Amino acid sequence: MKTIVRLFSIVVFLSLLVGFSYTPVEAGGKCPTFIAHITHGIDGTRLGLSQELPVVVYVYFGPNLKLLDKIDLKYKESFTAELPRGTYLIKVYSVELQDFVESMTVGPDEVPGCTKVIFQARLVGGEPVINVIVRELAAKQVVSQ
């Protein structure tokens, strides 16, 4: 059950990253940010829990993986943010189970700029998982006059 909750949270975070369209402006030839979209797509009743299946997505950032943000999500909710490129670790905490879902942990991984990263929490074969989709975004050149 703990694994299911963690997978669900990671999927939610990934789904939120995908849902927002964005075209970053290149800075010095490199994009300093990426778009993260997390979506909570797991109906908790399919796991014997409440339909809302409330979770807290913990986002850690940087070489020391310091806590950057905590995001509260329920079934069918999503979250989108523009974040600096770098190393990230995502953990999902189930409010109902009062524990982290290990199977839904993503990272630590390096996330490049000029991308949109979608974290989709969903059930696959009855098991909560996080689908991570990375899309490259077209960078625009800044023209100074």
Image (tube, rainbow, N blue to C red):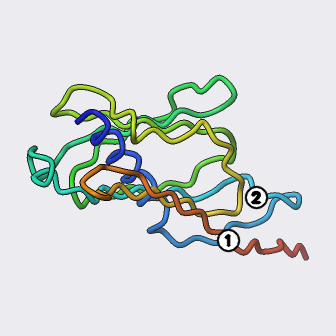
Task: Give the number of callouts.
Answer: 2
Camera-nearest residue between 10 and 76? 10
Camera-nearest residue between 66 and 90? 90
Q: Residue at x 8, y 46 (%)?
A: 50
Type of residue at label 2? Cys
Of the two numbered discs 1 and 2 in the rendering, the one whose residue sits closer to the viewer: 1
Dot 1 or dot 2, earlier in sequence: 2
Give the answer, above or below, for where 28 lies relative to 143: above
Q: Give the SS element for disc 2.
A: loop
Where is mark 2, residue-wise?
31
Q: Give the SS element for disc 1.
A: loop
Q: Residue at x 65, y 46 (%)?
A: 84
Left or right side of 44 for 111: right
Give the answer, above or below, for where 33 lies relative to 135: above
Q: In which quarter of the image is residue 135?
A: bottom right
Where is mark 1, residue-wise?
137
Q: x, y (%) of residue 73? A: 27, 47
Give the answer, above or below, for where 96 lies relative to 54: above
Give the answer, above or below, for where 116 lies relative to 73: below
Left or right side of 136 for 119: left
Quarter holding the N terminus is top left
Type of residue at label 1? Leu
Camera-nearest residue between 14 and 22? 14
Q: Which residue is drawn at 68% across and 44% down?
A: 110
CA gap between label 1 and label 2 equals 10 Å
Camera-nearest residue between 145 and 8? 8
- Asked if the residue under mark 2 is in contact with the one under mark 1, i.e. CB atoms within 8 Å, the reply is yes
Within 10 Å of disc 1 (Cα), the crowding (few <14, some 14-19, many 20+) is some
